[in-house]
Image (cartoon, rainbow, N blue to C red):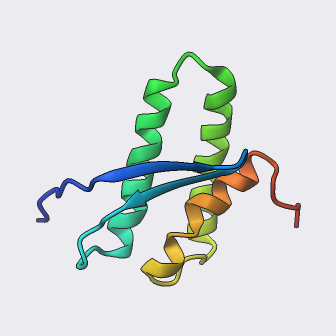
């Protein structure tokens, strides 16, 4: 059984659509731990924005996109998985072209 390890994060904004979270995961983190950490962070965002329907809509779309991208095979290895949250968010706000 794994023991939860606190992971410090820094939220960075650049321009109107770029949102980045800088994290320092332990080197032995698995892909699954990284994915579930992202989902847990989104749940926290949902909880603190529970009265903002617009933000909740974006977070809901981002969460759905996050899981869809991961299940579709995006993110083969931790270095590729880190691209999923940004792609999920950009798709949720309509900043990515439709396929």
How many numbered marks appear? 0
Residue 75 place in picture, x, y as percent: 54, 77
| Vertical relation: 84 (above or below) 47 | below
| Vertical relation: 50 (above or below) 63 | above
Q: Is residue 94 left or right of residue 22?
A: right
Quadrant, the N terminus: bottom left
The residue lying at 44 percent from left, 27 percent from top is 47
| Vertical relation: 11 (above or below) 69 | above
Q: Nearer the viewer, residue 76 or 25?
A: 25
The residue lying at 47 percent from left, 80 percent from top is 79
The residue lying at 25 percent from left, 78 percent from top is 27
Quadrant, the C terminus: bottom right
**Residue at the outermost bottom position:** 76
**Residue at the outermost right position:** 98
The residue lying at 31 percent from left, 75 percent from top is 30
Q: Is residue 49 left or right of residue 43?
A: right
**Residue at the outermost front position:** 14
Q: Nearer the viewer, residue 49 or 19?
A: 19
Q: Is residue 88 left or right of residue 40?
A: right
Residue 4 place in picture, x, y as percent: 16, 56
Q: Is residue 42 left or right of residue 96?
A: left
Residue 37 position by quadrant: bottom left
Residue 20 place in picture, x, y as percent: 54, 55
């Amino acid at each position: 059984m794994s023991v939860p390890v606190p992971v410090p994060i820094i939220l960075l904004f650049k321009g109107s659509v770029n949102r980045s979270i800088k994290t320092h995961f332990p080197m032995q983190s698995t892909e699954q731990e990284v994915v579930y950490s992202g989902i847990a962070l989104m749940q926290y965002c949902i909880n603190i924005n529970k009265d903002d329907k617009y933000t909740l809509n974006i977070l809901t779309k981002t969460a759905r996109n996050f899981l869809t991208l991961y299940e579709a095979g995006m993110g083969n290895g931790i270095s590729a998985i880190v691209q999923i949250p940004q792609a999920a968010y950009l798709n949720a706000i309509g900043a990515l072209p439709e396929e």
